Amino acid sequence: MQQDGFLIRVRGQVQGVGFRPFVWALARRMGVRGVVLNDPEGVLIRCVCANVSVFAAALRDEAPPLARVDAVEVAAARVEIGEGFEIGASEGVGAETRVTPDAASCEACLAEMRDASDRRYGYPFVNCTHCGPRFTIVTGLPYDRWRTTMARFALCSDCAAEYGDPADRRFHAQPVACPVCGPRVWIEPEADDPIAAAAERLLAGQVLAIKGLGGFHLAVDATNAVAVDLLRERKRRPGKPLALMGTLEMVRRYADLSESAEALLADPAAPIVLLPIEGEPLPEALAPGQGQLGWMLPYTPLHHLVLEAVGRPLVMTSGNLSGEPQVIGNDEARDKLSAFADAFLMHDRDIARRLDDSVERADPPMVLRRARGRVPGTVPLPNGFEDAPQVVAYGGQMKGAICLLKNGQALLGHHLGELDEALTWDAFLAADRDYADLFDHKPTVVAVDLHPDFRPSRHGAARAEAEGGAAD
Ligand SMILES: [Zn+2]
Ligand SMILES: [Zn+2]
């Protein structure tokens, strides 16, 4: 039966972040009747509601941690709804194609990991709707478990119950896993306790390859000058600053940490943040001649476990051959990183997409390298861009990146690196296809750098010509 009610449209990063179960719980609490669903424009609510302004305000104010609400639009409407409040099926073509960025482990998951009575005690892959891998495990669209690298891990009954319960923190959390059904970690050469063995090797000054979210890192004890020199010698990179990983307490001991820098470090994106050196000394070789160091907090459960076992900050530099992109596969790591690493901390959740760590500055806020944790997030553009034509922009040859414009939003792709290198160019082409799919993007304008010999410029011109136009 149709009745007087409201249509509420929520725009922003509201899919794949637990927004529908949040609305469901909020509606039940406030006695709102109706339905919430995903569609190509975001989240749509049809409801009958006594105080719609309070409900609409709560949608914005109490949104889940990974949501970004750009707009809540309320319109009176005749609606067809039942007695309670339901989570409805998606509507419209292109619904649920949005994938959110990877997010650092949340406090609730870490608490479970440290609780000896919890079924995920010590489990290096604990995650939920509010945290964990996203973009780096996606193999296809729309985003669901069967189109991620978690597809091969069938849910156990406990995980399936959590996945299916709207009141649970893991409702529709695609990478949900536990020690019974999920990925596992090991170390090569083999040891009974991989985390303890990893810590032992790091404390002995060895170089460890650690599989992360968007690729492998090479790690050493950052307080050990001999180990840092060894890593530099093996990588043949004498001067390039090395990124560090530590807990907040560790960072405070070695860096001048402003309030805004601390907030940025603790952001779910967990970027590398450049911080002035201050306090206890660290080896000069970490960043020769520099007044600042790049720090990040541990962002996967595995990082937390290793860091807690070592008790010292770690160098976490990209695991790659000089000039090549970061290594992501286990066999690739064994092949390419064995000249650098004494041991490998591996796991069997595949990395679908290579993403470097993002690099940022807090004071003033500045993104220096946009990558893991930030992509494929969109940036809302100022008013006036809503009806602008769809644009794809291909950027320069060095530090390459792709940008897509649509519906008043810019999807700024990840840092791809120097595009002279064949493997990096392959990554550029893959990113071009990926982002077009993700954004359901059909550009009418291709923007390129005027340099005629830049590969992205030639690529853009060829694409425009193939589609019957010319690159601008
Ligand atoms: Zn979590
Ligand atoms: Zn399970």
Image (spheres, rainbow, N blue to C red):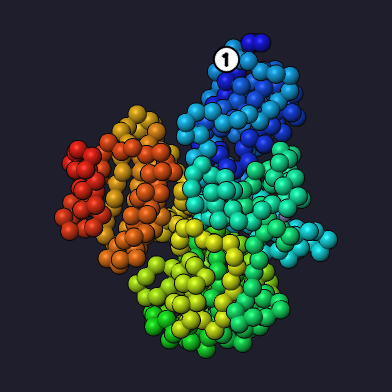
Residue found 67% across the figure and 36% down from its top: 21
Residue found 49% across the figure and 58% down from its top: 352
Q: In the rendering, at what x and y percent does residue 63 appear?
A: 62, 38
> Which quarter is ligand 2 in?
bottom right
Q: Is residue 241 left or right of residue 103?
A: left
Does residue 218 sit above or below 94 in this rendering?
A: below
Choose between 332 and 459: the one closer to the eye: 332
Q: Quarter of the image containing the C terminus?
A: top left
Residue furthest right as drawn: 117
Choose between 114 and 139: the one closer to the eye: 139
Q: In the rendering, at what x and y percent does residue 203 appear?
A: 63, 84
Q: Secondary structure at mark 1?
A: strand
Mark 1 lies on residue: 76
Residue found 57% across the figure and 15% down from its top: 76
Q: In the rendering, at what x and y percent does residue 331 appear?
A: 50, 72
Res 412 visible: no
Q: In the rendering, at what x and y percent does residue 360 appear?
A: 46, 59
Does residue 133 sit above or below 283 in this rendering?
A: above
Q: Is residue 207 left or right of residue 448?
A: right
Residue furthest left as drawn: 452
Q: Quarter of the image containing the N terminus?
A: top right
Q: Is residue 228 left or right of residue 171?
A: left
Does residue 471 sit above or below 429 in this rendering?
A: above
Choose between 8 and 459: the one closer to the eye: 459
Circle 1 Cα neighbour tier, 10 Å, few/some/many (<14 / 14–19 / ≥20): some
Q: Amino acid at mark 1?
A: Ala
Choose between 419 and 282: the one closer to the eye: 419
Res 9 visible: yes
Does residue 310 sit above or below 98 in this rendering?
A: below
Cβ of mark 1 under 8 Å from ligand 1: the answer is no
Residue found 20% across the figure and 53% down from its top: 458
